[in-house]
């Protein structure tokens, strides 16, 4: 039997992981609001067949709330990581292809942002913009671009000294042409893998900031809010509102991290052909 190529195996695994995440996201969107309404007759029920994740103190089904919360987290992760990766790409290219003064200024800004704990900076930005979804997205997007920007900068600096870049310059090609036809195709795999790997960080910071009360509004079914509410009832023996939604969030983060790792291996010619 002919052995399958490693790249094919990695692609199948990446597609499977992406399918699971899409399914979770779709289920969260399709659940009607009626399914998460409270009922005091059902309040505080432990996990059972009718409520696999149990119910909270208001009688709301925790599985439905968790799926809805995960869909919100995935939405925040997609938007915030996309904006942050776009900033990283522009800043990294500008730093590598600009003057020494521009490069020094960009590196100073990166050092400044990375020197402040992400959670603290997200809290400050979110609070300054009035909390809510807008402030949360702005805070996450403004704090997660630095590492990817440095990676892009290093790749551009490395490629600028390549012979084919020097030949293009000798032939009179402009910097924009070289960027579009030579650098962007080379940066594509690293950028895509970096974008996917930003996603878990964005989700975890969204949950942590919402848990502290500076992110999404309390009426929105977000995982951070569910965990925050569950803290009041842990001493009463209600462990499931904290453990099961938290485990679901951790599972999504690990799935996304695994997906990013698989994409990195697929896009790397060395590891893809092992």
Image (cartoon, rainbow, N blue to C red):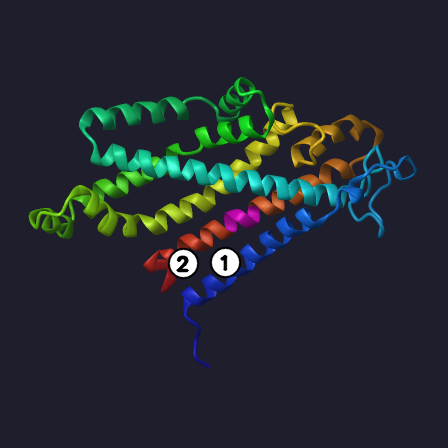
Residue farthest along the left direction in this orientation: 170
Give the mark nearest the N terminus, 1 or 2: 1
Q: Is residue 156 magenta?
A: no
Of 23 and 239, nearer the camera is 23
On screen, residue 241 above or below 169: above
Query: What residue do we see at 24% from left, 42% from top?
Result: 156
Residue farthest along the right direction in this orientation: 41
Q: Position of residue 33 (x, y in %)?
A: 76, 42
Of 39 and 272, nearer the camera is 39
Mark pair 1, 2: CA separation: 9 Å
Q: Position of residue 131 (x, y in %)?
A: 59, 23
Query: What residue do we see at 69% from left, 33% from top?
Result: 220
Dots 1 and 2: beta carbons under 8 Å?
yes
Of 74 and 251, nearer the camera is 74
Q: Quadrant of the C terminus?
A: bottom left
Of 174 and 71, nearer the camera is 174
Query: What residue do we see at 29% from left, 27% from top?
Result: 106
Say the numbered circle drawn on residue 266.
2
Q: Is 237 displayed left or right of 154 in the figure?
A: right
Write down the residue under mark 1. Answer: 14
In the image, the segment drawn in magenta is 254-258
Mark 1 neighbour class, 10 Å CA radius: few under 14, some 14 to 19, many 20 or more:
many
Q: Position of residue 53 (x, y in %)?
A: 78, 45
């Amino acid at each position: 039997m002919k052995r399958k190529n490693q790249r094919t195996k990695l692609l199948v695994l990446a597609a499977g992981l992406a399918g699971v995440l899409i399914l979770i996201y779709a289920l969260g969107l399709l659940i009607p609001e009626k399914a998460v309404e409270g009922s005091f007759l059902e309040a505080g029920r432990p996990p059972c067949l009718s409520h696999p994740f149990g119910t909270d103190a208001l009688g709301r089904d925790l599985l439905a709330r968790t799926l809805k919360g995960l869909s919100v987290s995935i939405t925040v992760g997609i938007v915030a990581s996309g904006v942050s990766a776009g900033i990283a790409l522009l800043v990294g290219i500008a730093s590598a292809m600009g003057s020494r003064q521009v490069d020094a200024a960009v590196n100073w800004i990166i050092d400044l942002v990375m020197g402040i704990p992400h959670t603290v900076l997200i809290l400050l930005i979110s609070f300054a913009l009035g909390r809510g979804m807008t402030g949360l997205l702005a805070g996450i997007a403004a704090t997660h671009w630095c590492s990817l920007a440095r990676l892009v900068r290093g790749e551009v600096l490395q490629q600028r000294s390549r012979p084919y870049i020097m030949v293009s310059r000798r032939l009179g090609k402009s910097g924009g042409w070289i960027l579009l036809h030579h650098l962007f195709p080379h940066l594509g795999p690293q950028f895509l893998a970096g974008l996917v790997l930003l996603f878990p960080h964005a989700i975890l910071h969204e949950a942590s900031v919402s848990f502290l009360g500076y992110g999404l509004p309390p009426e929105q079914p977000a995982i951070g809010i569910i965990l925050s509410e569950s803290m009041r009832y842990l001493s009463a023996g209600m462990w499931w509102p904290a453990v099961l939604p938290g485990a679901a969030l951790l599972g999504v983060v690990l799935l996304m991290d695994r997906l990013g790792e698989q994409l990195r291996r697929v896009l790397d010619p060395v590891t893809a052909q092992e």
